[in-house]
Amino acid sequence: MPGARIRPFRADDIPAAGALLAARHRAHRLSCPLLSPRYEDESAATAELAAAFAQPGASGAVAAQGGNIAGFLLGAPKASPVWGSNVWIDAAGHAVAEPELVRDMYGLAAARWVQESWRAQYVLVPASDDNLLRAWYRLGFGQQQAHALRGLPDNAPVAPPKVVIRHARRSDLPMLARLEVELPRQHSLAPTFSASPVPSYAECLAGWEEDFDDPAYTTFVAEFEGAVIGSSIGCPLEVSSSHPPIARPDHAGFLAFAAVFPHARGLGAGRALGEAVIAWTAQAGYDCVATDWRVTNLLSSRTWPRLGFEESFLRLHRLVGY
């Protein structure tokens, strides 16, 4: 942009960039008040930014205007084969005084990332900032995942007729393993086309046998005419690596998983399983509940907003060179 000097991000940029991040978070909480207020404080925001800069391979750019920093962008790869040769601009990884600056900073930072073969690129953007989202869209990024929050329920859930919701028992393990295969299998189909591998039934069953009694997780099943047709899981939000600290409310529960067998869809079991986790969140003493979904998953992207979840961050994705 005219008047902006774009240069690589340096360690001595962290305090000024932290102030920008705190300002972005304050503005974000006007539309998403369930987010933690702690990151409105510059010291807390700066600490998150310092942690991001300390990640192996971290690099980025800043926009300097009139001797001040008007924007920063910071990304780092994640060591997971699921994401390919990747770089992530996480929730604490960018803030700007003017959205258009994102495009200039990305132009500098991405040149290095592509040179280092980081072609699968991801960014978490506040869902309420339309101008910032449009700047990323004009860089070739598109929506992949939604992160969402909702407050506690006012009333107890009511299961649909003929669907019974109950806590899972050890005798349910074979069905729970089948349902764990079902969600990634659905994601592999149109219109999501996820490249993540679908686990085997044997792998999932072994995992359930090992972890079923873990007190951090609460599992529900839905029954129809005596047969298990779906399941859902609730847990503390902190166990989710996909929800970085600045994107987490304080003391939140997490709707971590839900799946219904294809033959049983349309009975209301998915909604009832989600409501069971939301009710558990309140009973367990959490202050709110979070979840996330692939925006191309036609089922979850419609069901969870109907249950009162409102988008907090959007994960955008770009695959360079194809």
Image (tube, grey):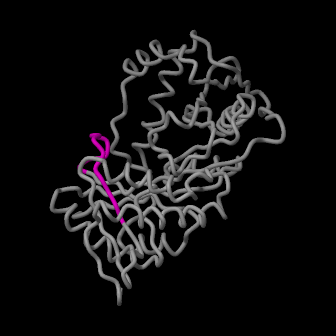
Q: How many marks?
A: 0
Left or right of residue 111, residue 218 in this image: right
Residue 79 colored in magenta in the image: yes
Residue at far right of view: 155
Q: Residue at x 49, y 49 (%)?
A: 294
Left or right of residue 265, residue 108 in this image: left
Q: Above or below — where is 233 with respect to 105?
A: above
Residue 22 colored in magenta in the image: no
Rendered location of residue 188, percent (x, y)? 39, 43
Foreground residue, 53 or 302?
53
Q: Residue at x 38, y 85 (%)?
A: 66
Q: Quadrant of the C terminus?
A: bottom left
Residue at far bottom of view: 2
Left or right of residue 272, residue 58 in this image: left
Residue 283 found in image quarter: top right
Q: Residue at x 26, y 74 (%)?
A: 7
Rendered location of residue 293, percent (x, y)? 52, 47
Residue at far left of view: 115
Q: Residue at x 29, y 63 (%)?
A: 60
Left or right of residue 27, residue 105 in this image: left
Foreground residue, 297 or 167?
167
The residues colored magenta run: 73-85
Foreground residue, 114 or 7?
7
Rendered location of residue 106, percent (x, y)? 31, 70
Q: Quadrant of the N terminus?
A: bottom left
Foreground residue, 70 or 178?
70
